[in-house]
C-alpha cells in the first residue's frame, strides 16, 4: 500500500502502526480532563497556582515505557505543553514549567530518555494555543508587537524541543484555532524543524486557511489542513486520509484526554477493534492515556492495553509491518489485513461453524494457519471461492482469533470483491440478480 510513495525515512510509521498518546500536565490534579480550565471557565490565576504546586511524586518514565512496550505500542507522543500553557520541560522562555516550579524536573527529558531506551520512536505534542495569552485570540492585527513576541516564543520553544533532546521522530501540533498558517508562520517553522531534525514527521495541524483549504481533522476544529503536514490526524474517528499517511488519535476512556476521575473505559476488545480497523484501512492508531496527578497510568488502562499486548504477541504480524487490507468484503466476520503475499483474517465474530467461505479470491493459496493456535488448516478453492475447513467450535482466542492465508503471489480479487454496496458499478449487482433466472423482473419466489 505505497499509495503515497512514502519516503524511506518515514516507513517506520506504517510499520509501527500503534502508538501511545500521553496527555499529562497539571490539569491531572483536577481529574476532569485536560481542558478543565477552559471548560469550567476557571480563574486562570488560581489554576496557575495549583499548576505551580503540582508535584507528581510517583512519576517514573521508565515504568511507563516498560508497560507501554509490554502493551505492544511502538511509538509514543507526549504533551510538552497543552492549551493551559504549562511547559513540561526546562524551557528558557518561561518559568511556567516543571523544571522551574515544584517538581524541579525536566519531564520531557525523562520521557524521551526512558522511551528511547525501550526502543520507541519519540513523538512530542505541542499546542500553539495558550489560554493565558490574549493576543493569541485577538490576532496579530490587534497588537503586532505582542503577537510577534508570542510567535517567537512558540517558534523558540519548538526549536528548543528539537535541539536539546536528541533525535525526535515525530511532532504533533495541536490547538490551532482561531489562527491560520500564515499568522503562525507554521510553514517557516516547519522548514526550521526539518533543518534541526531532517527525518522528522510533522502532523497536519499547522493552521489551515478557512477560505482556501479543507479541514481534515474530522471536524474537531483542531486545525488539520488537507494540504499541510506529513500525516493526517483524524480525531476520535477512523477515516482514511486521502492526501497522505494518517493516524487516528483516540481516547481509551469515553471522552476526555487528560486524567478523569470516575472515567468509563472502553473494553479491550473495543480498543483492539479500533486498532484493527485503522490497520485494515491503511492507517495507524495513536491511543491515549491520561496519567493521574501522581504520575501513574490508571489501572484500567494498563489492564486493557496489556491484554491487547498479549494478543499482539501472538497475532502482531497481522498488524505491524505495514499491513493494510480489505481485499474483499469481510465485515460479516471482521477485518482483513494484507502484507506481501499473506492475508490475515481478524475474526471479530466467531460463529462456531467448521468452515469459513471467502468469496472472490482469484489467487492460488499455499497454506492456511490459525495463527492463534499455530495449527495448519485445510482449505479448498473452487470457482473463485476459498473454503477454510476444520475450524474449532469455540473461539480459540481471548479476543479476536486470526487466520493467516499464504498465497502463491500477491492476492487478487475480482470486481465483486473490490466494490462495496453503495459504491462501484451497480451492473454487477444486476448480473448477480439475473443469475436466479433470465427474466429480469420476476418477483415471485422460484
Ligand atoms: C483536541 C483537544 C485536545 C487534545 C487533542 C488530541 O484538539 O483540544 O484537548 O489534546 O485534540 O488530538
Image (cartoon, rainbow, N blue to C red):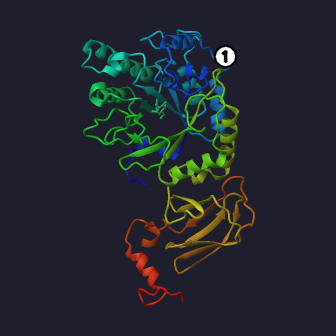
Q: Which residue is mark 1?
A: 57
Q: Position of residue 220 (x, y in %)?
A: 43, 38
Q: Is residue 258 visible?
A: yes
Residue 342 x/y as whole percent: 55, 61
Residue 187, compared with residue 227, is above or below; it is above
- Where residue 92 appears, as percent x and y from the top left, is 44, 11
Displayed quadrant of residue 300: top right
Q: Residue at x 49, y 74 (%)?
A: 362
Disc 1 on helix, strand or loop?
Answer: loop
Residue at 41% from the left image edge and 44% from the top image edge: 8
Where residue 128 sits, quadrant-wise, is top left
Residue placed most toward the observer, 257 or 244: 257
Q: Residue at x 38, y 53 (%)?
A: 3
The C terminus: image quadrant: bottom right
Q: Quadrant of residue 33?
A: top right
Q: Is residue 199 visible?
A: no
Residue at 42% across, 86% down: 441
Crowding at mark 1 (Cα within 10 Å: few <14, some 14-19, many 20+):
few
Establish whether ligand 1 lies closer than 8 Å to the Cβ of label 1.
Answer: no
How many callouts does the rendering have?
A: 1
8 up-or-down from 205: above or below: below
Given residues 142 and 56, the one toward you in this image is 142
Residue 397 position (above or below residue 252): below
Residue 148 picture location, percent across and down: 29, 16
Q: Is residue 428 above or below residue 368?
A: below
The quadrant the N terminus occupies is: bottom left
Amino acid at each position: 500500500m505505497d499509495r503515497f510513495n512514502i519516503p524511506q525515512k518515514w516507513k517506520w510509521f506504517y510499520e509501527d502502526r500503534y502508538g501511545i498518546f500521553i496527555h499529562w500536565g497539571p490539569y491531572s490534579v483536577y481529574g476532569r480532563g485536560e481542558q478543565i480550565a477552559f471548560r469550567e471557565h476557571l480563574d486562570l490565576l488560581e489554576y496557575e497556582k495549583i499548576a505551580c504546586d503540582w508535584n507528581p511524586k510517583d512519576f517514573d518514565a521508565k515504568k511507563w515505557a516498560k508497560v507501554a512496550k509490554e502493551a505492544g505500542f511502538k511509538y509514543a507522543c507526549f504533551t510538552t505543553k497543552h492549551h493551559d500553557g504549562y511547559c513540561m520541560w526546562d524551557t528558557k522562555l518561561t518559568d511556567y514549567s516543571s523544571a522551574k516550579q515544584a517538581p524541579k524536573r525536566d519531564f520531557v527529558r525523562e520521557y524521551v530518555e526512558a522511551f528511547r531506551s525501550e526502543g520507541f520512536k519519540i513523538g512530542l505534542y505541542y499546542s500553539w494555543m495558550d489560554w493565558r495569552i490574549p493576543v493569541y485570540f485577538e490576532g496579530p492585527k490587534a497588537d503586532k508587537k505582542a503577537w510577534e513576541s508570542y510567535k517567537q516564543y512558540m517558534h523558540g520553544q519548538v526549536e528548543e524541543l528539537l535541539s536539546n533532546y536528541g533525535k525526535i521522530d515525530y511532532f504533533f501540533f495541536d490547538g490551532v484555532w482561531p489562527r491560520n498558517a500564515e499568522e503562525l508562520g507554521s510553514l517557516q517553522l516547519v522548514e526550521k524543524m526539518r533543518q534541526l531534525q531532517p527525518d522528522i514527521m510533522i502532523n497536519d495541524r499547522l493552521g489551515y486557511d478557512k477560505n482556501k483549504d479543507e479541514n481534515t481533522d474530522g471536524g474537531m476544529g483542531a486545525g488539520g489542513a488537507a494540504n499541510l503536514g506529513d500525516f493526517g490526524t483524524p480525531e476520535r474517528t477512523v477515516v482514511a486520509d486521502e492526501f497522505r499517511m494518517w493516524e487516528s488519535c483516540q481516547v481509551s476512556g469515553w471522552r476526555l484526554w487528560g486524567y478523569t476521575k470516575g472515567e468509563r473505559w472502553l473494553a479491550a476488545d473495543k480498543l483492539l477493534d479500533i486498532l484493527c480497523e485503522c490497520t485494515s484501512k491503511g492507517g495507524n492508531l495513536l491511543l491515549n492515556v491520561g496519567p493521574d496527578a501522581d504520575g501513574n497510568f490508571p489501572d484500567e488502562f494498563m489492564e486493557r492495553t496489556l491484554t491487547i499486548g498479549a494478543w499482539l504477541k501472538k497475532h502482531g504480524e497481522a498488524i505491524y509491518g505495514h499491513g493494510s487490507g480489505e481485499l474483499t468484503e469481510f465485515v460479516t466476520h471482521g477485518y482483513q489485513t494484507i502484507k506481501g503475499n499473506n492475508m490475515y483474517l481478524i475474526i471479530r465474530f466467531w460463529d462456531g461453524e467448521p468452515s469459513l467461505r471467502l468469496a472472490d479470491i482469484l489467487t492460488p493459496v499455499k497454506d492456511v494457519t490459525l495463527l492463534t493456535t499455530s495449527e495448519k488448516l485445510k482449505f479448498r478453492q473452487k470457482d473463485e471461492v476459498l473454503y477454510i475447513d476444520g475450524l474449532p467450535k469455540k473461539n480459540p482466542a481471548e479476543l479476536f482469533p486470526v487466520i493467516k492465508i499464504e498465497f502463491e503471489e500477491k492476492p487478487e480479487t475480482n470486481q465483486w470483491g473490490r466494490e462495496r454496496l453503495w459504491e462501484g458499478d451497480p451492473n454487477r449487482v444486476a448480473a448477480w440478480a439475473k443469475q436466479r433466472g433470465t427474466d429480469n423482473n420476476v418477483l415471485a419466489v422460484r
